[in-house]
Image (tube, rainbow, N blue to C red):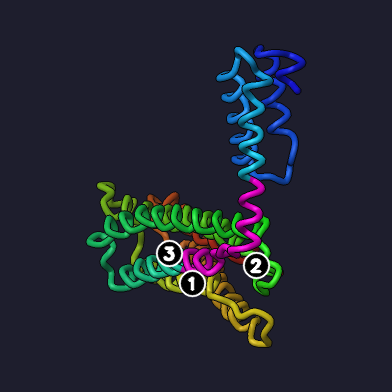
Amino acid sequence: MTAWLMGSTAGSVAAIAVIAVVVGPRRAVDDRLQAASTTVIALAATTAAPVGGLLIPAVQTLTGAVVGIVMNALVLPPLYLDDSDSAVYDLARAMGTLLREMGTGLTERQPAARAHTWLHQARDLEKDLVDAEEQVRQADESPRWNPRCTAHARRKDGTYGEAFRTLRGVFLQVRGIARTLACNAHDDHTDHHLGQQFLDQYAEALKLAGTAVEEFAEPRPVASSSATAPRERLRGAIDATLTWHETMTDLIGRGTLTKPGAWHIYGSLMTDVERLLLDLDHANTP
């Protein structure tokens, strides 16, 4: 209709883009942008006869939609929920393992020897993050026009999309902790080095935080009386880490653990753990 009323002009291109992006607010942004770009490309390719040229692509699109819906009804394509859950849990387990490894390394007083290894491992987590994001996206899209989801009990609880979004923020904190430890371990200014008392205390906090991250994405049974057990374990892990955090904050405030030249490093490490816990705690709230 836009091509018929306005022709192949800049105004029609703008109108089509605006309509395609604005209409259907429940659709994903990528889907709307894809619809807009496809329409504009089709209009640009058929400037000689816009209405006639656009009719065939429109019919092809509608035909494809009908065939897709029919195939979904007959073949019952998979929902990919298990793949999504596994990818998110694997991401959480990898981050939790790294946190606990950093805690163990600090306990064994090996930050200088292992700090760069931790940093590389933290950066490599981005591959797991991308994989989990793709799996979650596929799981979110698979129930569309899929009759299998009506009989799938777990569909009521949705996918692990919310958990993934929380873990994406946790990933930033884990990488920040690894980078701070690596930079501090090889800082030429000796007065910037962290005190061993702090590192011993911080090691325990990292171990507890690693356990909390793993418990956060622990698979939870559905419609079972024991479904609250993982949530209770997560609550316990978060509370234990918060207790350590409060104790360390008090010790730092009284100057027990700090070297004055490293005040900014203490703040960075403590803030990263605090934000990590807040993200987990907020997501764990029903």
The structure residue drawn at horizontal position 65% and vertical position 61%, both measured from the top left corner, is 73
The structure residue drawn at horizontal position 65% and vertical position 13%, both measured from the top left corner, is 8
Report the predominant secondary structure element of the magenta stretch.
helix
Q: Dividing the image into 4 quarters, which one contains the N terminus?
A: top right
Q: Nearer the viewer, residue 124 or 71?
A: 71
Which residue range is magenta in the image?
65-89
Which amino acid, mark 3? Met
Q: Position of residue 140 (x, y in %)?
A: 61, 57
Residue 157: give its label. none
Residue 284 higher or lower than 31, as above or below: below
Can residue 247 be seen in this snapshot?
no
Which amino acid, mark 1? Glu
- Local packing at callout 1 (Cα closer than 10 Å; few below 14, some 14-19, many 20+) is many
Tell me if residue 74 is in the magenta stretch: yes
Q: For the view shown, which residue lies furthest in the left direction?
A: 113
- Local packing at callout 3 (Cα closer than 10 Å; few below 14, some 14-19, many 20+) is many
Residue 214: give its label. 1
**Side (left or right) of 48 relative to 203:** right
Mark 2 sits on what residue? 148
Q: Nearer the viewer, residue 162 or 19?
A: 19
